[in-house]
Amino acid sequence: MHFIVYTNYKFKTSVVDGVEIFFTVPMFMIVKDLSYTVEVKKSGLVVVKNMKIVGLHCSSTDLHAGQIALIKHGSRLKNCDLYFSRKPCSTCLKMIVNAGVNRISYWPADPEISLQNEASNPMTTDDAKLDAKAVERLKSNSRARVCVLLQPLVCYMVQFVEETSTKFDFIQKIAKSQPDLNTDFYTVCRQERIKEYESLFLISSEEMHKQILMTIGLENLCENPYFSNLRQNMKDLVLVLATVAASVPVFGCFGFYNSESRRTNETDHQDLPQEIARHCMIQARLLEYRTEDHKTGVGAIIWAEEKSRSCDGTGAMCFVGCGYNAFPAGSEYADFPHMDDKQKDREIRKFRYIIHAEQNALTFRCREIKPDERSMIFVTKCPCDECVPLIKGAGIKQIYAGDVDAGKKKADISYMKFGELEGVSKFTWQLNPLHANALEFRDPTARENGVQKTKSLDDQQHQSKKLCLGHY
């Protein structure tokens, strides 16, 4: 789930390595749509070329993620690196290998053709085992590297992500709105996400996990300490994903809303369902941890809504580009100042050198922003005066962001233009202006382990719609 300006630094300053980002992004692509069959598991896919993300894909009802990547990119997949949330099936792998990809990395749990339902359907499991053997043969006889690429997280990463997620602007805004709140809502939300993601991405039974690993050609990982280390690394990465996701929570009437009193039915000004907006913002939050700024990480991701639904599992939504704040590509750590406005000497402050997340997302986008499409950018902080004109000039129709800094002018950076921006719809994290006096809407039927779960009003309105990115 970290990306855009990838350079070969002699030593890294970012918290999250590229491997973790490339895995968490495809994993998170499938979180909101569990409409796969028992036999074929839904999968997410990140396509990377020259260390830049050029595609985010999710399997659909009719097509696997690998097949969709072939349709979308074709021969442009040559020399790309692909990161799957599951080991791809032979149908996908043979086409991907044929396209000349460089490397295929996958999450070492249940593969795309599931091996977990042996007891309930032995015949289907036989087919899955045959597919696993075919995948191994394709792997052995192809130029592309097909491998598990899961590294242990740095020792402080889980703690750092938890601390920064707790202090994230959206969480703090909720806390300030309800000073008498007795429940630690962030912890509750985080625990719910951990439970959800563990059931989706992990295999609870160690014996079942070992059987699957042996079937898919990873018997060398079944012996300790390799097996125990593998499972711990997987748990840690799922914990990071859940922790970040909880920082954009479902809580009462909080969400992304346009507070302007005048409402319009024009497509460019219609807001996304809250579940979709949160989903995209969490992707931006994951990018934030790839920052090269010691103090403030910012992530941005751009999506566009096409006129008609595509074959992708993201529906009409099409990935445009993404980025995080970093120094110019190709630079070394000590080439530019890293000091903030606490440094009295303005000459050695960072602000004139660092590339903002929005700027990187626009610079390294993988497709053009078309004027007849509803394009939208999701930014983890309020866009500054440098970026607001760029966003408008690029033709982006909507901005989803926080507004904590809106209207402020700091020593070296200003946020005055965001509030004055016209011609672009702004959806900021806030209480629903139509229901500002009702902080919580509860569904009496929504209970989990005896605990009543909170749903936002907007999600209740959209509950009959498929919760997949773009499925609405």
Image (cartoon, rainbow, N blue to C red):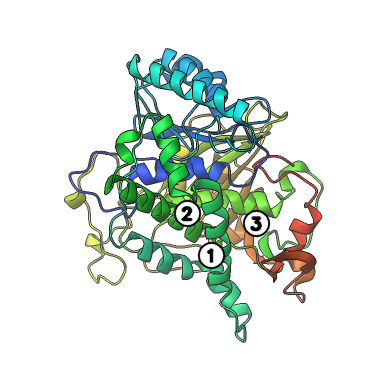
Crowd class of label 2 (few under 14; some 14 to 19; many from 20; radius 10 Å): many
Given residues 193 and 467, the one toward you in this image is 193
Pair 3/2: label in front: 2
Question: Disc 1 or 3, which lies upstream in sequence?
Answer: 1
| Amino acid type, label 3 | Phe
Q: Which residue is mark 2?
A: 241
Q: Is residue 422 visible?
A: no
Tell me which corner region of the image, top left, top right, bottom left or bottom right, holds residue 440: bottom right
Residue depicted at x 62% and y 60%: 428
Secondary element at tag 3: strand
Question: Disc 3 or 2, which lies upstream in sequence?
Answer: 2
Tell me which corner region of the image, top left, top right, bottom left or bottom right, holds residue 295: bottom left
Q: Is residue 427 visible?
A: yes
Q: Which residue is mark 3?
A: 427
Given residues 444 and 426, the one toward you in this image is 444
33 sits to left or right of 163: right
Residue depicted at x 32% and y 16%: 143
